[in-house]
Image: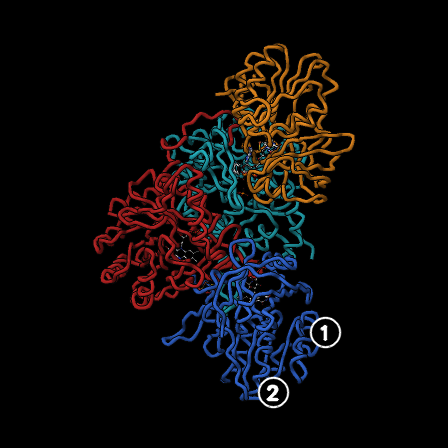
Chain colours: A cyan, B orange, C red, D blue
């Protein structure tokens, strides 16, 4: 049976469920020579703040087993430069444009979102709430339900655009945060951002990254991401955009079954710039093999009460 | 003119051990052979990230390029085990290479360790362009690691100056000694340098105030194409210090645009 | 210079800093034919509860990229059987014996610890506070400072043995938990236990593990473990036993520099039963290369103000 | 008598593709050649865990053993790419194999798919011991996958009974048909079976009440030596259901001691 990759995240339709993850795909043109942007489900740009952020000292990346640590520190040129230099390219790229928004206070988040209101060609906003909250001494907005709710509420009042909130995995109960932001009007949940980690540079007897700790991404964190998507899917009614270590169509299917409606690919693009297109090419065969004719048919298939979870299990039935 | 960036498999046509733990691979890669010396490629190795390697040779005529690297970790070890005829998956050519040297100004190429190869590519490309004297200064830990010396010798008339940390070849010490002497003879000269960061810092410091000093830098990279902002170094911006991306704004920078502190 | 591997964790001395991690080394004899127990710094046995625990349905393990998910579910035969069947072997094994203690209520933890009081040959107790707390509806004791402190306080009053508390990484602020248990008399912190994750069995459209979610271990979590050790080391004054993905002497050195005094090896033993001995063999050369003559010299070397962290960094200085 | 467990490198002396995606490796491994049929080895492959594989052949005289496996994922794909003379790192022999069959009771060996190999090892070891008739029933998806049929044929007088899902060889259906007929002829017989879990469940169900039914099971494993409690299956305990470790208490269990629900 023919497979149709069209996907929707709430009211927003995508040609397919595979998007580029924020921070790993710049503002679009950088990968232009290597990736056909028009084939992607969407592109989430690097986090944008009201004024330029300098980011952290180098080294900013460090390879780990099946993973990557980064401490870019959210360097970006600020929303003005973004609107002037980057949006025009993105508008004509033929893909959905998701603007990742960052701020150090609630006001800063609102500033970015309000500035973007006058700009066309933006399909969704993705609130990165893993930023240091300067008013609360550096804890992040994503760290507790109250602050996550507060920033969502404030931003919600500034825009009618689809509003996605991106969860930090560095909390005891991500689903609780998801519920809190859903109540404030979030249209979707992005999960997950990077997991805080570090590496030691033995030779120099110091943390390997200039920013000391960094965010862990890549296949190493896929099990953590799947668990969080699965937990969040049982807690909220809004769609989920899943990410963390995706590099194959089978990985996408895992996220769909765990409850995601669409996915993003980040770190894998560094090794294989064409990987998103490869995945999109492979998805129809993968879905057929799993008896599905669309991504939507698999969404949440592994959730309790949905799949064969209560199925009789015999001794030794590991297959 | 730099070639277009692409991602492609290229065959290894020739492999050579050039020094202990130093391997050179020659690839049949017409698309890469349009690169500018100082540009680099991002090579697929197992694991999360690719590995940046500069061109040691660029021969547009044969369509061949060289990659000369030191085995320092898993990625380069894997590369050193590739056999002739196997394919390497490569993104490139990437970055901004050296600017063409000015024809009438004395030209000095200063290389340290595995920083030597891109200077050979530069010399090969522009040896006929520069009419003023061309000097080469190569530094390394020991005699073993003064790589590509014969290659340089074939292309320049003047003797190659060599320094080693232990004095096992050439004079004992660093490239800064001969470079200081060269500078005093050629205050109007132009310099291309590549090597370990402390060496480049020394070069930048020594040649302060001199125009036309170009340095090829290294930094840990993610994407290699300017998207991830991993590979930054501090440069002089219009409004104070500002990050430059080694993969996109470099790896070659004018010494003056960088902040060494 | 000669390297001396002797290590101390508080008052307890070890012949070397490398111990077997709880749950991956059974009760000692299982690996007997393949591992010389007398060469290990110590052995932490599988978690022991007052009465037998049944554990979870299979499958109980699932491989992930550079990692392993397990949902053993703390199956164990209970403290009585442990004392009768396993302790006699451990007593004569010629290594330090650490008993990992589990319970579903504070009373259960105390029951195990009290029962062990009359037994000789136990060098330390390791409190696994990642157990489901039945009185609090399944949340774990390790999830907040109050509960972690309460269980530590109660157990502390039952024993004078060295008391190590093993942290769960599945919280926003592990260092806060460490501080709380230090205040209640913990003698050391073990960090980390596994990270909650999951995998999907695409063929059966269900979670791959019988226990639905599982604990992620192995090299994938090493960056997370190092980060937590580094954070805890700055927060407490008691020693830390580091673990998570260790499989080489260099890995051990990373944990030492991050602030651990000793380490445990878990998942890596499955692929290479001899890996702990291999690491112990390699440690002298590794330490020499790092200019150290003992593990203690490296402990905390990468902590702020200790190493070359404030060192001048030039552009491009990535080496 | 089972050999001592050890971890060691053994050379592959012979490699053969026995069916599509099915490979047999013969190892020179005197220490393993003392194993009991039904025991298994834990083979090092890249990644986090080893891979459990049963012995397809055990020849104490030549000191050789066989491992026959289906390529189903990365680990077995890697194994299938090993060349002759390369070494495999192996922990073994592990687990509890089949009990020696009783000499005077009819013996039936029932294998499904890649469950066939350990039964061949059992037949080879005990073919002279059993004086009563020996029957072999092999089942597979299609004719291609009825592996080791010729090997069995050389050791038994009676014709081998074959079933395939599609009827492309032998009778169409599962091993349960021929097994039911065998049972009615030999109510006092003994059965060794190995194959996919649903097949073993069917065998256990069909032969309920019959003594001497031994099944070789599979379960996802961690350590392979009984330490991690990963590989459990539900068995009858003195005080109700209780977990058994496939790696240590099995992989061979008496059908009666397992709970199939
Ligand atoms: C623009 C550029 C050009 C280069 N050209 C050459 C060359 O021509 N010949 C050569 O021998 N080396 C060159 N290098 C350095 C080379 O990239 C590293 O030696 C190599 O990446 C090490 O990989 P590994 O896996 O063997 O080592 P590991 O230390 O195991 O690598 C771990 C990670 O660190 C990165 N890394 C390690 N060392 C460096 C370094 N010095 N610079 C940047 N990233 C590093 C790796 O890419 C990898 O992501 C160049 C670096 C850059 C940035
Ligand atoms: C005691 C025992 C004996 C076995 N003997 C044989 C044999 O002789 N021939 C043969 O072809 N196969 C045998 N198997 C099954 C074999 O172990 C798996 O097919 C193999 O592990 C798959 O590895 P993979 O990396 O190719 O597949 P993947 O599916 O990628 O493996 C992923 C993980 O799942 C585990 N796994 C996957 N399938 C199984 C399975 N059926 N049973 C247990 N673990 C599994 C793997 O070991 C690995 O840890 C046996 C299994 C057991 C437990
Ligand atoms: C180098 C790098 C930079 C990132 N920058 C951002 C960012 O600016 N905003 C954001 O929300 N997430 C950022 N992320 C997180 C990714 O968008 C993604 O959530 C995470 O990497 C997990 O996906 P992956 O494993 O496919 O990379 C960044 C990740 C990396 C590796
Ligand atoms: C199969 C398995 C069982 C475990 N059982 C226990 C346990 O009973 N008690 C405990 O405190 N930790 C247990 N752990 C956690 C380990 O002791 C260790 O903290 C963790 O695996 C990280 O180390 P590693 O990456 O070296 O495995 C278990 C881990 C695994 C893989
Ligand atoms: S490596 Fe990504 S910007 Fe340079
Ligand atoms: S695999 Fe560890 S107990 Fe069986």
Where ligand 1 lies, by image quadrant? top right
Instruction: Please give left or right for residue B130 compared with residue A243 in the image.
Output: right
Q: Quadrant of the N terminus of chain A?
A: bottom right
**Label 2 vs label 1, nearer the camera:** 2
Examine the rendered structure and indicate whether residue A254 appears above or below residue B190: below
Residue visible at 66% across and 32% down?
A: A92
- Judge by depth and name the residue closer to the eye, D254 or D260: D254
Classify 10 Å Cα crowding around label 1: few (below 14), some (14-19), many (20 and above).
some
- Judge by depth and name the residue closer to the eye, C25 or B123: B123
Which residue position holds label 2? D133
Residue visible at 45% across and 47% down?
A: C282
Instruction: Please give left or right for residue C206 compared with residue D117 in the image.
Output: left
Query: In terms of image quadrants, where is residue C215?
Result: bottom left
Q: Residue furthest right?
A: B61
Query: In terms of image quadrants, where is residue C161?
Result: bottom left
Instruction: Please give left or right for residue B63 compared with residue B261 in the image.
Output: right
Element class at badge 2:
loop
Residue visible at 72% across and 41% down?
A: B11
Classify 10 Å Cα crowding around label 2: few (below 14), some (14-19), many (20 and above).
some
Examine the rendered structure and indicate whether residue C26 appears above or below residue A170: below
> Where in the figure is residue D191, as x and y percent of width and height?
55, 81
Element class at badge 1:
loop
Q: Quadrant of the C terminus of chain A?
A: bottom right
> Where in the figure is residue A227, as x and y percent of width and height?
47, 51
Q: CA distance from mark 2 to mark 1?
A: 27 Å
Which residue position holds label 1? D168
> Where in the figure is residue C182, as x and y percent of width and height?
27, 45
């Amino acid at each position: 049976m023919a497979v149709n990759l069209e996907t929707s995240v709430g009211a927003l339709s995508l040609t397919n469920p595979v998007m580029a993850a924020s921070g790993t795909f710049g503002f679009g043109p950088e990968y232009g020579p290597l990736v056909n942007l028009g084939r992607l489900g969407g592109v989430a740009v690097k986090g944008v703040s009201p004024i330029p952020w300098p980011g952290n000292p180098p080294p900013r990346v460090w390879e780990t087993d099946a993973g990557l640590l980064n401490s870019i520190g959210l360097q970006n040129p600020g929303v003005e430069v973004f609107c002037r230099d980057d949006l025009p390219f993105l508008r004509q790229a033929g893909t959905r444009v998701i603007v990742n928004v960052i701020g150090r206070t609630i006001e800063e988040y609102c500033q970015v979102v309000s500035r973007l209101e006058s700009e066309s060609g933006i399909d969704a906003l993705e609130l990165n709430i893993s930023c240091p909250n300067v008013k609360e001494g550096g804890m992040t907005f994503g760290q507790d339900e109250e602050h996550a709710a507060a920033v969502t509420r404030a931003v919600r009042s500034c825009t009618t655009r689809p509003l996605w909130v991106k969860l930090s995995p560095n909390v005891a109960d991500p689903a609780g945060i998801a519920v809190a932001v859903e109540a404030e009007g979030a249209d979707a949940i992005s999960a997950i951002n990077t997991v805080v980690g570090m590496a030691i540079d033995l030779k120099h007897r110091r943390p390997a990254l200039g920013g000391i700790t960094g965010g862990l991404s890549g296949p190493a964190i896929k099990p953590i991401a799947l668990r969080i998507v699965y937990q969040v899917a049982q807690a909220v009614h809004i769609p989920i955009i899943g990410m963390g270590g995706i590099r194959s169509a089978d990985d996408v299917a895992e996220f769909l079954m765990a409850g995601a409606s669409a996915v993003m690919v980040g770190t894998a693009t560094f090794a294989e710039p064409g990987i998103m297109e490869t995945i999109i090419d492979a998805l129809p065969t993968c879905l057929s093999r799993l008896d599905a004719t669309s991504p939507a048919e698999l969404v949440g298939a592994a959730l309790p009460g949905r799949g064969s979870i209560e199925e009789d299990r015999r001794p030794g039935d590991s297959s | 003119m730099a070639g277009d960036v692409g991602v492609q498999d290229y065959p290894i046509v020739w492999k050579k051990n050039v020094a202990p733990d130093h391997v050179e691979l020659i690839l049949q890669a017409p698309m890469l052979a349009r690169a500018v010396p100082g540009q680099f490629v991002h090579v697929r190795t197992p694991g999360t990230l690719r590995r940046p390697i500069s061109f040691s040779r660029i021969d547009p005529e044969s369509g061949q390029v060289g990659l000369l690297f030191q085995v320092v970790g898993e990625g380069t070890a894997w590369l050193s085990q590739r056999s002739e005829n196997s394919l390497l998956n490569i993104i490139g050519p990437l970055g901004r290479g050296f600017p063409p040297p000015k024809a009438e100004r004395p030209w000095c190429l200063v290389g340290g360790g595995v920083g030597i190869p891109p200077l050979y590519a530069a010399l090969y490309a522009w040896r006929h362009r520069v009419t003023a004297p061309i000097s080469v200064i190569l530094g390394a830990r020991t005699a073993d690691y003064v790589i590509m010396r014969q290659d340089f010798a074939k292309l320049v008339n003047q003797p190659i100056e060599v320094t080693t940390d232990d004095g096992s070849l050439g004079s004992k010490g660093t490239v800064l000694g001969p470079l200081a002497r060269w500078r005093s003879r050629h205050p109007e000269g132009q310099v291309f340098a590549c090597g370990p960061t402390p060496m480049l810092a020394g070069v930048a410091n020594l040649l302060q105030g001199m125009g036309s000093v170009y340095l090829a830098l290294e930094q840990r990279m993610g994407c290699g194409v300017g998207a991830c902002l991993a590979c930054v170094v501090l440069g002089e911006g219009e409004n104070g210090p500002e990050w430059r991306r080694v993969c996109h704004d470099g790896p070659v920078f004018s010494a003056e645009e960088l902040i060494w502190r």
